[in-house]
Amino acid sequence: MKRRTLLLSAAALPLLPMPAAGANEAWGEARNYPGGWGNPPNWVGHKDLRVGNYSGGYEKMFPVHTLAAQAQASPLAVQLRDDIRYRWGLLSKTPGEYVQGLPVTSLLIARRGVILAEHYRFGRQPDMRLTSWSMAKSVTSLLLGICLDRGLLRSLDDTAQVYAEELKGSLHGGITLRNLANMSSGAAVLHDRDNPQIYPKAFLRKNSDLELTVRDWNQSEGPQGTRYNYNELCPLTIGMVIRRVTGKTLSAFAEEALWQPMGAEADATWLTDSHDREYNCIGFAARLRDWARLGQLVAQNGAMQGRQVVSERWVNECASWSDRDAQVRHGVAMPGMGYKYFFWHPKADGSWMMMNGHHGQRVLVDRKTQTVMVQTAVDSEGPWQREFFALFEAATQLA
């Protein structure tokens, strides 16, 4: 019997650091990495349950939709290299040493469809689906781009209520798709303060209703399009629009328009509210290699095996800024980081694009070399971020 709870820990926090792992026992090794709610019930707070929950456990706790893979996966060759090294202080370290020092459950480095490094820890295996947390927002971005490519949306400068009539008269109904995708709605919502209200209403309760939660959040703190403000309501509103214009669940549309054309090797899942609507700010789970394929798709400007899955125009849009996106430019959205259409940008020129999720979930892409690095993890406290980028920078420099 699936359960829901009002207990909530912070979810989908952006770019927090990561500590040394410590003993595996802290993560549930002695009990073979169990999942579940724990005692007292808490869906994310018990560290010894995270490994299990982040690799399939949530699918037993919440309703899910499944995205079926096609029969033939796009190829990922394996040519493991032993010469990947990066400088960290006085040390020269390998990817294997990196994952051993941090609570990382898996790591993969690939370039142009070739896997150069692949590691699993804490008993995780290649056939396990690994949760995304807020990397699901970037999946939503790709679906938004496909809707534009297909003419299902006329313009990003249309408001959400043009397509989702149930939003008429609400704050989020009057926000443009552009400002929603740039986390610039002007809504009075703070990620850390308000997630304990949003998550129970929109996802955790037995009668959760994400659409009602979006419609009822009507307090503004300023004009839209002027300030970056990371929150869950913006992607949830975009998800409502995509469902309306496609006439499908996000999962059914993603299966037909993204997952199968990309050539995923295995099924993916997406968690839903009590009305079977994908909670698309988080909740997407896939194998490590399929996360790498999503990164490869971005690195190849939306194409896979000669097929344009999402347009090159959309990928370029996600990696560039105009006057209408000034509030999310690199260094303006936040120190040392930019944002655009649910993607993060560690470099000012847009050449690095990152899917970013709570507790260390990352897909980082270098568009210049088509290098992709995927990481899944179970914690995000401590000075991890510079080392993560140092490893990736070294991977991009490989001959």
Image (tube, rainbow, N blue to C red):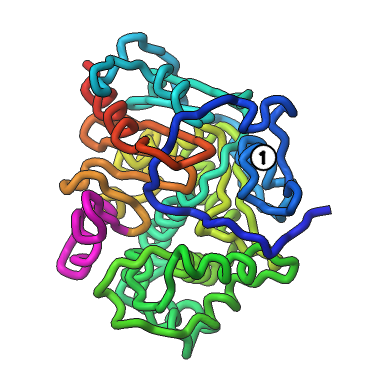
Q: Residue 224: image x %, image y %?
A: 30, 78
Horizontal relation, residue 339 to residue 11: left or right: left
Can residue 267 be seen from the camera position used here? no
Q: Residue at x 28, y 54 (%)?
A: 318
Does the rendering let one see residue 70? Answer: yes
**In what quadrant of the picture does the C terminus appear?**
top left
Q: Nearer the viewer, residue 71 or 268?
A: 268
Name the residue carrying label 1. 49
Report crowding for label 1: few under 14, some 14 to 19, many 20 or more residues within 10 A (C-alpha): many
Q: Label 1's element?
A: helix
Q: Residue furthest top?
A: 82
| Position of residue 23 in the picture relative to residue 310 (left or right) | right
Label 1 sits on what residue type?
A: Leu
Q: Residue 223: x and y, percent? A: 29, 82
> 313 left or right of 21?
left
Depth order, front residue of 349/202: 202
| Vertical order, 102 against 160 (above or below) | above
Residue situated in front as seen by the camera: 191 or 296? 191
Q: Which residues are magenta?
A: 317-340
Looking at the image, which residue is at 38% across and 25% down?
109
